[in-house]
Amino acid sequence: MSSLCVLGLGYIGLPTASIFATKGRSVLGVDIAPEVVATINSGRIHIQEPDLDVLVRAAVQSGNLRAATAPAAADTFIIAVPTPFTVDAAGGRRPDLSFVEAAARSLAAVVAPGNLIVLESTSPVGTTEKVKAWIEDELRQRGRAVDGLLYAHCPERILPGQMLKELIANDRIVGGLTPEASARAKALYEIFCAAQIFVTDARTAELAKLTENAFRDVNIAFANELSMICDRLGVDVWELIRLANRHPRVKILQPGPGVGGHCIAVDPWFIVDAAPAEARLLRTAREVNDAKPGHVLARIRAQVAPGAAVACLGLAFKANVDDLRESPALDIAVHLAAEGYRVLAVEPHITTLPVALAGRAELVDLPAALARADAIVLLVDHRAFGSLTLADLAGKALIDTRGQIR
């Protein structure tokens, strides 16, 4: 039975490692955080995801999954580490591949001819080739041969809150640097993937994932820009979209406070960085969505002055998850605290405030927020907020970025 080593035990790596382990594969999960390693080896999880705790516990108890802080020899290596971006002095966004490079270089000590190295991290076009170059550079420094390794890219397409279901049910794309690598990667994911697996080259696979998220970003930007236009013109954007969507070929998305998460808010910048002169629409969409939190802040300032108690309902980047990465809701709460507002953060999916708000805001439940706040700002449409009505908020200012409270 083949063995796997998964580098990165976050929102992608941990579910992937666990599902391979429950399919009978011997899996070593690697993470640079000792506390994450200890948590997983005890059969527990450090992130919130429905049913993932059950899967991890079963995988660990079976003996097929264990965690460590360094990789070990295996037949297949999967890199699933973060790929954020950096912001330069001029405001330009550049991909940060330092985590991928560190993971790739760490493999040189343990890889052997015939091994398959799969990059799952969402990456700029050409990154799989860079992984190959980094590993080969390390091997040469060690005086070892560089031939006989296979490289492929297989981007994930899973949604927080539905990860385990979508890992199995969603189509996948695999793109190898060689036909042999593509075939090996396809066979690997056929172990658990019940949907279709499409084979292409590595660069197309890399750009496909970026394209999927850029498409969504552009459509969200259209809705967010409409909401700002409606605020200027005194039109109810929710009514406008409802009516426009009655057209049989129109399907406008719902606006919000911005765009967050590690995918949609990040991936389009990788395309813009690679082709800045051509990616004009993608850049504009990113700028529209990045500007939306500022628009929400302006609406809050227009209704209540600094010193007021403002209840921020939701800090996560999307509904019903605990993921705060690139969250516009968190960004808005941080700015309010910095401007002297008394921020009451209501986020039912976390138990402690993130570092950016520690000592600057108070984490409270919904009843306390309703009792104490001068203004209510609905930022995330969590199920926990679904029963709120205008009658519940009598006498308070309301900024509803999700169109939920009626």
Image (spheres, rainbow, N blue to C red):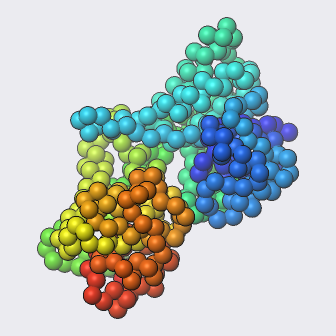
Q: Residue furthest left?
A: 233
Q: Which residue is outermost to the top?
A: 143
Q: Is residue 381 visible?
A: yes
**Foreground pick, 259 / 221:** 259
Residue in the image at 29% along x and 62% along y: 336
Q: Quadrant of residue 152?
A: top right
- The location of residue 364, given as percent across then percent down, is 46, 72
- Looking at the image, residue 274 sits to the left or right of residue 189; the answer is left
Q: Is residue 40 left or right of residue 24?
A: left
Q: Which one is nearer the viewer's eye here, 67 or 178?
A: 67
> In x, y percent, where is residue 99?
53, 33
Q: Is 170 placed left or right of 256 in the picture?
A: right
Q: Looking at the image, which residue sits at the far bottom?
A: 391
Question: Where's residue 182, x and y in %?
Answer: 64, 35
From the top left corner, tell me how far across and down residue 22 is, in percent: 79, 52
Q: Residue at x 20, y 70 (%)?
A: 305
Q: Is residue 185 visible?
A: no
